[in-house]
Amino acid sequence: MLKHPGHASLEARKRSHLRMTGRERNAPNMSSGEDSLIARYFRPLATDPGAFGLVDDAAILQGRGDEIVVTTDAIVEGVHFLPDDSPDTIARKALRVNLSDLAAKGAVPAGFVLTLALRTQDDGWLAPFARALGEDAGLFGCPLLGGDTVSTPGPVMISVTAFGRVPPGKMVRRSGAKPGDRIVVTGTIGDAALGLDILKGGAVATALAQDAAASRMLAGRYRVPQPRNALAQAVRDHAHAAMDVSDGLAGDLAKLCAASQVSAVIDIKSIPLSAAAAELLARGAVGIETIVSGGDDYEILCAIPEAGFAAFARAAELAGVAVSSIGTVIAGTSVPRFLDAQGREIALTRLSYSHF
């Protein structure tokens, strides 16, 4: 998934744009279908006092002395989710891909605004969508602040803009990695790309035709990301640079290195894989390029100084998040190199997913 993050600091009590009020433009001030949709499905999610129950044109987000980190991502039917995906998984993905950005910046979630572009007002779709969105908003401490609802003749689109808090000057940027830092990732890499192949009936689906449990796990990794917000403080305390892995490990590492004006060397065998991904790779059912370039992992990629790695690893263990050291930052500006078990460079024909 191509990212267009817009991270910035806002003043305390910054007023964030809000249109999920049901007030239709150029229409009399009376209840509308949009009013009813918002009141039924989304007003119960607006638990923050600054949301004003979604009856105003804007919300207030209290800075509380922190800086506000802002990120936004949209997911589109047929691009980021499949037309027959269930509305609850779509809702969770829409919010979680943004929460993943906040985690990689070391930010604590503060709230989000939502834009929904729908073909029809389908209660059978909206009810589970709103229920799952509300569950995740509560789980991650990120309440709905507002947004907009529109109709569209095209594919369904859900856009979330999420806000997070960090102490002044403490947001972890892509830039900042230094030669000698360890390259570290959370979780496992490549599962989501394999899951998408399964859902599309591709080669991975054929290879795992007799392993329903592995197929479900991989498909689930694509449909419902697991943002590593429990690790946000450890990232803030220990990382020189960080971002989330959304477009593919190889491509996102290249972006981090470019922003930091460094390069990196990665040990392929150190990249953490799920049992299912490791088996598929060992059998030759998929190649390493699929694993490192596929996208939709939503894990954290960070540069940790050698002296701080042990403390970072302890914090990750306490947070219940697996972390793996996969390589080293080096001086230079060349594209990061991926080396096999014999130390030979692996040629990658593509580094990441791209929309264009």
Image: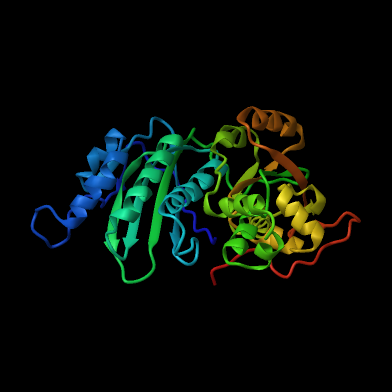
Q: Quadrant of residue 132?
A: top left
* Quadrant in the picture for the C terminus: bottom right
Which one is in front, 327 or 159? Answer: 159
Residue 245: image location, x then y, percent: 61, 52
Quarter holding the N terminus is: bottom right
Work out whether residue 104 or residue 258 is closer to the camera in this orientation and state it. Answer: 104
Q: Which of 338 and 136 is in front in this view?
A: 136
Name the spot of residue 323 as percent of width and height, x first: 69, 39
Is 64 placed left or right of 319 in the picture?
left
Q: Quadrant of residue 229?
A: top right
Determine the residue positioned at 61% across, 37% down: 235
Q: In this orientation, does residue 334 appear?
A: no
In which image quadrant can residue 241 be found?
top right
For residue 216, above or below residue 237: below
Question: What residue is shown at x 40% (from left), y 50% (from top)?
Answer: 161
235 on left or right of 269: left
Position in image of residue 129 (x %, y %): 37, 50
Number of disc labels: 0
Answer above or below: position of 107 versus 147. Answer: above
